[in-house]
Amino acid sequence: MNSISAKALSNNLRKHLRAAGYFQKDLADELGLHPKVLSRKLSGNGNAHLTEEEVRRIITTLARWQAITTQNEAIQLLELAQKEQSSFSPQEWQTHPLNLLTSRNTMHHTDYVSRRSVRHNLPAQLTRLVGREEEVEQLRQVLGQEEVRLITLVGPGGSGKTRLALHVAKELVDTFAQGVWLVSLAGVRDSDRMLLGIMQILNIKPAPALSAIQSLITHLQDKQLLLLLDNFEQVSDAAPVIGELLAAAPGLKVLVTSRMVL
């Protein structure tokens, strides 16, 4: 890689990382490299260079972090690293996380606005999730299975189940047309209050002639979204209600954190 391409690649990476709230050190950690080693590889100092596999991992990581959102951006990075588009097979371009990238043939201004619009209420995480990569990948794969509609993360308080759920939910925002929505059930003690809480989060106004669950079903039946219900042990008797929602809304998935099995 010549010095001009190396500088352009380094600048592009910093731009994408900064826009998504990450730093080059975060990328180095993801690659298992010391930050100084990654800097040398990016600059080409001392005959250091990025391998094709490292370039592939950089691009898939940026896609997963939503630091890049289009195939054009990914291909530009490949070109700056002097790699071919064929570094990824056609199947890989259609597989997570590269399938989150908008195709070159369908990229319009409205697509860009839609992808950048907020479709979640997930809180910003002030620290990185470290040491749970295997759990993250397993949960993401399970949630990606069409037949899986309900997943419960069970564990004692303080075991990190909510942090894990939030991390994976944030990565999956773009895979649900109507987004990902967190409903905290701390302090909620019955299913009616849970339903009202879900309606409030989704900005659904109760219809005078309908019950809360009927109002929710009417809203959700043609939607594709993920509900993250945190602290479900507070309303464990509401499990049948969740089953009713899932039965009526085929595009709905529910991720639950609880101290007990549903």
Image (cartoon, rainbow, N blue to C red):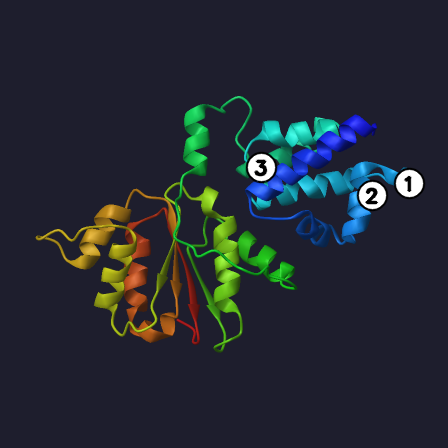
Closer to the chain start, of discs 3 and 1, is 1
- In the picture, measured across the screen, residue 102 lies left or right of residue 73, that is left
Mark 2 lies on a secondary structure that is helix
Mark 1 lies on a secondary structure that is helix
Closer to the chain start, of discs 2 and 3, is 2
Residue at image position (53%, 62%) is 164
Q: Residue furthest bottom?
A: 156
- Residue tagged by mark 2? 40
- Residue tagged by mark 1? 46
- Residue tagged by mark 3? 68
Q: Amino acid at mark 2?
A: Arg
Closer to the chain start, of discs 2 and 1, is 2
Q: Amino acid at mark 1?
A: Gly
Mark 3 lies on a secondary structure that is loop
Label 2, label 3: how many angstroms apart (C-alpha)?
A: 23 Å
Q: Residues within 10 Å of mark 2 (few under 14, many from 20)?
A: some
Residue at image position (28%, 58%) is 198
Q: Residues within 10 Å of mark 1 (few under 14, many from 20)?
A: few
Q: Amino acid at mark 3?
A: Ile
Q: Quadrant of the N terminus?
A: top right
